[in-house]
Image (cartoon, grey):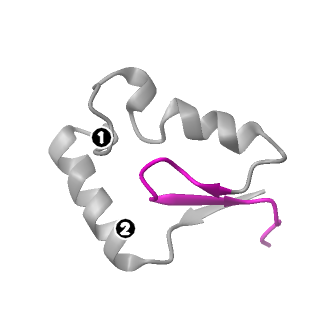
């Protein structure tokens, strides 16, 4: 498993700006709960799933099943 930032630098900049404005909470979520603090609980669970490959809810991170050395 490997987790990396989105390759689209514009998305990374916008999401990181949103994280600064929300105090680290996912800017794409309305509720400001611990589960929505970056890296959110949903993506942590997706990272633990060996079958999951894809982006987190806001698109900041991408999880692949490939191992990167």
Residue 45 disc label: none
| Count of all numbered marks drawn on residues in the image | 2
In this picture, residue 5 sits left or right of residue 62: left
Label 2: how many Cα within 10 Å (few below 14, some 14–19, many 20+) = some
The reply to whether the magenta stretch includes residue 63 is: yes
Report helix, strand or loop for mark 2: helix
Q: Nearer the viewer, mark 2 or mark 1?
A: 2
Q: Residue at x 46, y 58 (%)?
A: 59
Towards the viewer: 26 or 4: 26
- What range of the chain is rendered magenta? 54-69
* Residue at which label 2 appears: 12
Image vertical order of residue 9 relative to residue 55, above or below:
below
Q: Main secondary structure of the magenta part?
A: loop
Mark 2–mark 1 Cα distance, whole angstroms, equals 14 Å
Residue 25: percent from the left, percent from the top? 31, 37
Label 1: how many Cα within 10 Å (few below 14, some 14–19, many 20+) = some
* Residue at which label 1 appears: 24
Image vertical order of residue 61 relative to residue 12, above or below:
above
Q: Residue furthest top?
A: 33
In this picture, residue 34 sits left or right of residue 18: right
Q: Quadrant of the C terminus?
A: bottom right
The reply to whether the magenta stretch includes residue 42 is: no
Residue 8: percent from the left, percent from the top? 43, 77
């Amino acid at each position: 498993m490997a987790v990396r930032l989105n390759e689209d630098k514009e998305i990374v900049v916008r999401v990181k700006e949103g994280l600064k404005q929300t105090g680290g909470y996912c800017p794409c979520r309305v509720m400001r709960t611990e589960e929505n603090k970056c890296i959110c609980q949903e993506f942590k669970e997706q990272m633990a799933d060996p079958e999951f490959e894809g982006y987190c809810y806001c698109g900041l991170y991408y999880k692949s099943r490939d191992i990167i050395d």
